[in-house]
Image: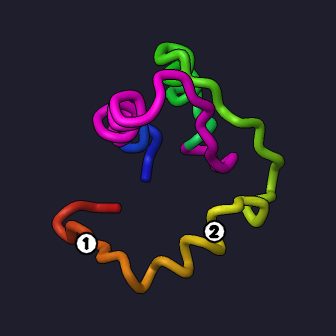
Amino acid sequence: MKSVQYKDLLSDYAVPTIKQKFVQNFEFQQYNCSVHTSALMKKFFEKEHIQTLDWPTRSPDLNPLNPNLSACTPFVNFERNTDENP
């Protein structure tokens, strides 16, 4: 995934849903991969007034959701559109 695709995903789906169904002000957690930390994404978060959680470099294993998500995976149906490039 590229930064433009990630921004579109967040701006079109994730952020509006979070703001509508949960809270207006929140901290966004993400890893430090280049897609998440690009200049485009920094501008997006600033424009949308979204704070990001500071995340240690090379520490994805600190994510408390990973063990829980792996337990839920058998119950989730993931569909992927194979017509598009990842």
**Residue 50 on image: x %, y %:** 56, 23
Q: Is residue 15 magenta?
A: yes
Q: What's the magenta region?
A: 8-35
Find the distance from the CA under tag 2 to the CA under tag 1.
Answer: 20 Å
Q: Tell me which numbered mark, 2 or 1, is placed earlier along the sequence.
A: 2
**Residue 74 on image: x %, y %:** 42, 86
Image vertical order of residue 81 relative to residue 75, above or below: above
SS of the residue under disc 2: helix
Q: Amino acid at mark 1?
A: Glu
Q: Residues within 10 Å of mark 1 (few under 14, many from 20)?
A: few
User: Can you name the residue that lies furthest to the front here?
Assistant: 22
Q: Which residue lies at the image location 47% right of the left edge and 29% below the top edge? A: 23
Q: Is residue 71 left or right of residue 5?
A: right
**Residue 30 on image: x %, y %:** 62, 46
Q: Amino acid at mark 2?
A: Asn
Q: Is residue 54 left or right of residue 22?
A: right
Position of the C terminus by quadrant: bottom left
Q: Which residue lies at the image location 80% right of the left edge and 57% below the top edge? A: 58
Question: Label 2, on which residue?
Answer: 66
User: Can you name the residue that lies furthest to the left here?
Assistant: 83
Q: Which residue lies at the image location 56% right of the left edge and 78% below the top edge? A: 70
Q: Residues within 10 Å of mark 2 (few under 14, many from 20)?
A: few
* Residue nearest the viewer, comparing 2 with 42: 42
Residue 79 disc label: 1
User: Can you name the residue that lies furthest to the bottom here?
Assistant: 74
